[in-house]
Amino acid sequence: MRDRLLEAADRLFYAEGTRAVGIDRVLAEAEAAKASLYSHFGCKDELVAAYVQHRIALARSSIEAFVAPIPPGERALRIFDWVVAWVESPDFMGCPLQRVVGEVVDAGHPARVLAADQRDWLRARFTEWVKAAGLANAQQLATALLVLFDGAVIASVQDGSRRARDARWAAGELLKAAAGGRAETRAPKLRKPKQ
């Protein structure tokens, strides 16, 4: 029953937002009783947090699978190919974590805490990849790349994948400048990520 509730919440929250979807909608979609929701999640806030955790697990798995065959020194740029493929997928409606953070005002909300942890994870991955490329100022470059990543995702909601492609170009130029002109900037064939 927990999985059914989480699957229903995932579909509804991603399509309509966490504020717009009430508990009764989730229960109806999952064909579950209110007691089931409270026994598995306790309250709506915990269900929203479980949804965020689920999306984080999917994103990390997808990112790790995408970068696994790529040499570590190329991953800081090539992750933008993953972003392009993600925003071009037919079910893309923006970043679920960015959307939840935009809806949840309380900074201590468990979903916001999880979203912050995901940003820390992604920043750490960018730092690791920049270091693997042998570039100086890894923390600063990683933060700049994270800003490009965020901007690519949010701008693609309105403008389509061209913004993700713009971010990939900008990341290539940034990395190229940091490497003294030796970074690869052409885009390889893309694989569709699972998100």
Image (spheres, rainbow, N blue to C red):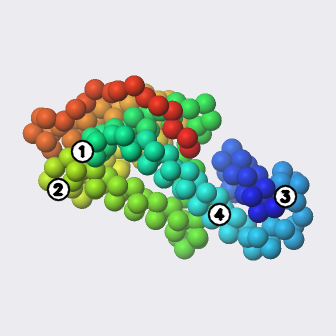
Residue 99 in view of the camera? no
Mark sitting earlier along the chain (1/2) = 1
> CA separation, marks 1 and 2?
15 Å
Q: Secondary structure at mark 4?
A: helix
Q: Amino acid at mark 1?
A: Gly
Cα–Cα span, label 4 and label 2:
36 Å
Q: What residue does disc 3 label?
A: 27
For mark 2, what is the residue? Answer: 137
Provide residue 149's location: percent of width, then percent of height: 39, 45
Kind of residue sitting beneath label 3: Leu
In this rendering, is residue 38 above or below 62? Answer: below
Q: Which mark is residue 162?
A: none
- Whether pointer 1 and pointer 4 mark residues with C-beta atoms closer than 8 Å, the reply is no
Query: Could you tell which of marks 3 and 4 lies nearer the N-terminus?
Result: 3
The label on residue 73 is: 1
Q: Residue at x 24, y 44 (%)?
A: 73
Q: Depth check: 39 or 14 in front?
A: 39
Q: Quadrant of residue 26?
A: bottom right
What residue is pinned by disc 4? 50
